[in-house]
Amino acid sequence: MRSKLLGSLYLSLAAAIWGGMYVVVKVVVDVVPPLELVWLRYIIALVALLTVGAVTKQSWRVARKDWPLIISIGLIGNTVSIVTQEIGTMLSSAQTGAIITATTPAFMVVFAWMILKERITLRKAGSVILATAGVLLIVGKAGIDPSYRLGGLSLLVAALTWALMSVLVKKVPGRYSQVTVTTYAVMVALILLTPWMFSRLPELDWQAMREPSIWGGLLYLGVVSTACGFLLWNRGLQMLNAASGGLFFFVQPVVGALLGWLLLGESIGLAFWAGTVLIFGGVLLVIRDN
């Protein structure tokens, strides 16, 4: 039970950090375009992870047979999922993004059943349904504007690939630290994204990026959101089964909406609080599931 509570705490913190990320991105993306933003946050995250690894004297050795799995995590989760999420958000609305992102835990239940042979219990299914209903209450109407279809398709790819990555993390042998796994996954993403940056980086407004709100936002996205967020998420998934761990993803839109209200003056109503109760009701079912 202690391990389950600790894993729940790690996953909740990761999701809360990513909820705060939306507020930061709203400020930074006006100066740094989405693809460049992903690349820069990974550069910063890599420096932070390597520093943590050096201070804690992590072992960087990985058995040859485990490299395909770690490379797959970097390709599927850190590259395809994050890039399609940024593109989808740019081509659609925040509401559309929240609705489609809410499918991630359901996909995790399916992938956990297919790959890890985890049993789909009534409690797990009920918790997903309860939390999904809460997200739909928060974001409002579930209808998607036809003009957002391309963005919606991109967000669906992001949800599918994030779910698959989260399940693959469970297959990583326990002898590897999460610092090592996360560092190599970020390296894979950087190697794949860097060729696209050669012609794009000179076009950045480096003068505008010297503003405290911009470089401070980049530090948050790189150190807190990427390095700390991925470490907490991957560690939490190691302590719970994949299907149950996915439910904590729903904390993200709650924190994002709450911070948008507090910091950006966005309005929230009774539906937000009712949805929040449903989401945490679903999470509570997971924590109490034995």
Image (cartoon, rainbow, N blue to C red):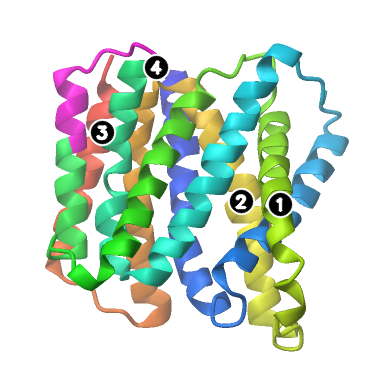
Q: Are marks 2 and 3 in contact (CB under 8 Å)?
A: no
Q: Position of residue 109 (x, y in %)?
A: 29, 27
Amino acid tagged 1: Ala
Residue segment shown in magenta: 116-128
Q: Quadrant of residue 93?
A: bottom left
Is residue 253 shown in magenta?
Answer: no
Q: Is residue 208 above or below residue 54?
A: below
- Tag 1 or tag 2, which sits nearer the N-term? 1
Q: Position of residue 216 (x, y in %)?
A: 67, 72
Q: Is residue 194 above or below residue 95?
A: above
- Tag 1 or tag 3, which sits nearer the N-term? 1
Query: From the viewer's perspective, is 19 left or right of 188?
Result: left
Label disc, if present, on residue 115 of the rendered structure:
4
Q: State the residue in front, 44 or 79.
A: 79
Would you name the residue on which mark 2 appears?
A: 226
Q: Are marks 2 and 1 in contact (CB under 8 Å)?
A: yes
From mark 2 to mark 1, how far is it between C-alphas? 6 Å
Which residue is depicted at the point 52% across and 55% down? Answer: 83
Q: Position of residue 110 (x, y in %)?
A: 28, 26
Q: Are marks 3 and 1 in contact (CB under 8 Å)?
A: no
Q: Position of residue 62 (x, y in %)?
A: 76, 19
Q: Secondary structure at mark 3?
A: helix
Q: Secondary structure at mark 4?
A: helix
From mark 2 to mark 3, how far is it between C-alphas? 26 Å
Which residue is depicted at the point 28% across and 48% down? Answer: 102
Q: Secondary structure at mark 2?
A: helix
Amino acid tagged 4: Ile
Is residue 121 shown in magenta?
Answer: yes
- Tag 4 or tag 3, which sits nearer the N-term? 4
